[in-house]
Image (cartoon, grey):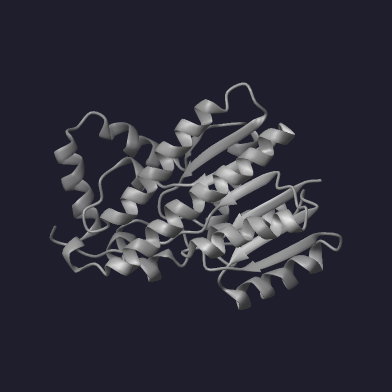
């Protein structure tokens, strides 16, 4: 039975992935702390997919106990997850010395630890079934240093390296892990990250475009996928410059006058 679990499903990229997987899944497990958003989205899906079994889990995934409770729920309900999409995450643009450290720790808990936990426990189940797909959302930010958004860039680098490593270990199995690396896309990210400067210079793409590309690349069994030709070229070009130059260029794109 095709069962898809998606975090950050009430809005943005998670929501767009849910729209895609609703077409093929028999069971959809949607996780987010936004209860109103999830309930409204469930009503929207039920109008189109009458037979779809939708489970809503209202969880704050910055809290490891609530992260673990998701797995406990799926075990209790005997829900065998065949597709996992770790789409929940947020960023923050601020000088490191001025950062709210509690917010940074919450970011690492969500962007890294929740993703790490879900990837580990559901991967084990998938290997037992010898089938499954995992999509972890990194970013082009994961390839480069990010002064003034250092925690966010570091978390996405973690996701990227983790995914590449796990994908190698999965050779010879029918379980695939894709690390999806988009550039800026339309979501609540800008508001939460206070990064209007960057987004004023770079036109974000629609989240649906990112989701469709990720869906396609996952089905192909790709290990890493950068979204968009411009982003692919940007990351490719960085290998020809010094780390100091790349860091300086990144900083100037994040903070005015950097």
Locate residue 57: give its quadrant. bottom right
- Judging depth in this view, the residue of 32 and 209 nearest the camera is 32
State whether residue 247 is above or below residue 199. above
Total marks placed:
0
Q: In terms of depth relative to the viewer, which is nearer, 79 or 215?
A: 79
| x and y percentages locating residue 155 in the rendered image | 37, 50
Q: Is residue 96 above or below residue 135?
A: below
What residue is drawn where x is 27% and y is 66%? 101
Q: Can I make out residue 25 in this image? A: yes
* Horizontal side, residue 163 vs residue 78: left or right: left
* Residue 42 vs residue 230, the one in the foreground: 42
Would you say 19 lies left or right of 236 here?
Answer: right
Write the residue at 45% across / 31% down.
Answer: 165
Counting from the top left corner in percent of width and height, residue 201 is at 30, 58
Left or right side of 156 for 122: right
Residue 32 percent location from the top left of the image: 58, 66
Q: Position of residue 28 (x, y in %)?
A: 73, 57
What residue occupies the far right of the structure in this picture?
51
Q: Relative to 110, does residue 229 appear above or below in the rendering?
A: above
Taking the image as shown, residue 224 lies to the left or right of residue 75, namely: left
The C terminus is located in which quarter?
bottom left
Question: Does any portion of residue 204 appear in the rendered image?
Answer: no
Q: Residue at x 15, y 40 (%)?
A: 245
In this view, which residue lies farthest toward the top? 172
- Residue, far bottom: 36
Taking the spot 25% from the left edge, 57% from the top edge, the residue there is 254
């Amino acid at each position: 039975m095709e069962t898809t679990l998606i975090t950050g499903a009430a809005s943005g990229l998670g929501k767009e992935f849910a729209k895609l997987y609703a077409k093929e899944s028999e069971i959809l497990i949607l996780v987010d702390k936004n209860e109103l958003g999830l309930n409204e989205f469930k009503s929207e899906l039920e109008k189109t997919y009458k037979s779809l079994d939708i489970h809503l889990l209202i969880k704050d995934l910055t809290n490891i106990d609530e992260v673990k409770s998701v797995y406990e729920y799926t075990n209790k309900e005997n829900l065998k997850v065949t597709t996992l999409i770790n789409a929940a995450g947020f960023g923050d643009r601020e000088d490191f010395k001025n950062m709210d450290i509690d917010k940074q720790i919450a970011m690492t808990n969500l962007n890294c630890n929740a993703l790490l936990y879900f990837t580990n426990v559901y991967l084990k189940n998938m290997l037992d079934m010898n089938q499954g797909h995992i999509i972890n959302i990194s970013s082009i930010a994961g390839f480069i240093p990010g002064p003034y958004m250092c925690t966010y860039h570091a978390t996405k680098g973690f996701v990227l390296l983790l995914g590449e490593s796990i994908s190698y270990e999965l050779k010879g199995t029918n379980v695939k892990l894709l690390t999806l690396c988009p550039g800026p896309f339309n979501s609540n990210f800008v508001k939460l990250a206070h990064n209007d400067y960057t987004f004023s210079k770079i036109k974000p793409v629609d989240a649906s475009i990112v989701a469709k590309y990720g869906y396609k690349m996952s089905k192909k069994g790709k290990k890493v996928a950068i979204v968009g030709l411009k982003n692919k070229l940007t990351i490719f070009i960085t290998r020809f410059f010094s780390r100091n130059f790349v860091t300086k260029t990144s900083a100037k794109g994040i903070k005015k006058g950097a």
